[in-house]
Image (cartoon, rainbow, N blue to C red):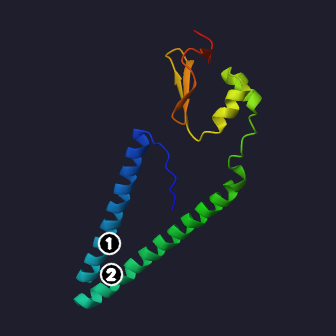
Amino acid sequence: MNYIRTPQSAWAAMTDWAITVVAWGGFGYLLVRCVADVLRGGLDGAPLSVMGALGAGAEVLSVYVCVAAINALALCVWAQYNQFRALGDRRRRAPAFSEVKQAAHFEVAPTLVRALQSYPIATLHCDARGTLRSIEAGGATVLPVDKVVPLRAAS
């Protein structure tokens, strides 16, 4: 299953952790307080046996589990809805970039572009100024080092 991961600032991450810790602390406090009250007989006025107390605690826990299950179901339905809603918003394929446009962009001959498209992997070697120095494809140099092609205007 793919999970959506987005970068968070340090403040947002700490806030998430703090809210989570407070929520679990509140849950633990309520659980312990309820079980302690049942064991002391605070809910009915009459003390219960240990098995009776566990039964009453299980009832409270079952309510918590039901609420958690409803929350989980709501989150799953919401995620599925968002996934369905975003189907039309996916990236569409970019329009075709013709060989002539590619050749003009890199300032090379269209025949070189066609030759490079026949190789699954090509390595472009540029200098620090962005000038294309050589192209290696299929283990051989396709464009020699002496052919200098500016890729961008010199600054």
Q: Write down the residue under mark 2.
A: 57
Residue 127: image x %, image y %? 50, 17
**Residue 65: mark in rendering:** none
Q: Kindly indicate the quadrant of the structure image that contains residue 86.
A: bottom right
In front here: 104 or 93?
104
- Which residue is located at x 65 percent, y 39 percent? 118
Badge 1 marks a residue whose secondary structure is helix
**Residue 31: mark in rendering:** 1
Residue lying furthest top: 155
55 relative to 32, above or below: below
- Which residue is located at x 71 percent, y 25 percent? 103
- Which residue is located at x 72 percent, y 40 percent? 94
In this image, 147 relative to 37: left or right?
right
How much space separates mark 2 and mark 1, taking CA atoms? Answer: 8 Å
Residue lying furthest front: 140
Q: Amino acid at mark 2?
A: Gly
Q: Are marks 2 and 1 in contact (CB under 8 Å)?
A: yes
Sequence-wise first label, 2 or 1: 1
Count the labels in the image.
Answer: 2
- Which residue is located at x 69 percent, y 56 percent? 87
In this image, 72 relative to 105: left or right?
left
Residue 48 shows in this picture: no
Residue 115: image x %, image y %? 66, 33
In front here: 94 or 60?
94
Where does the C terminus fall, quadrant-wise?
top right
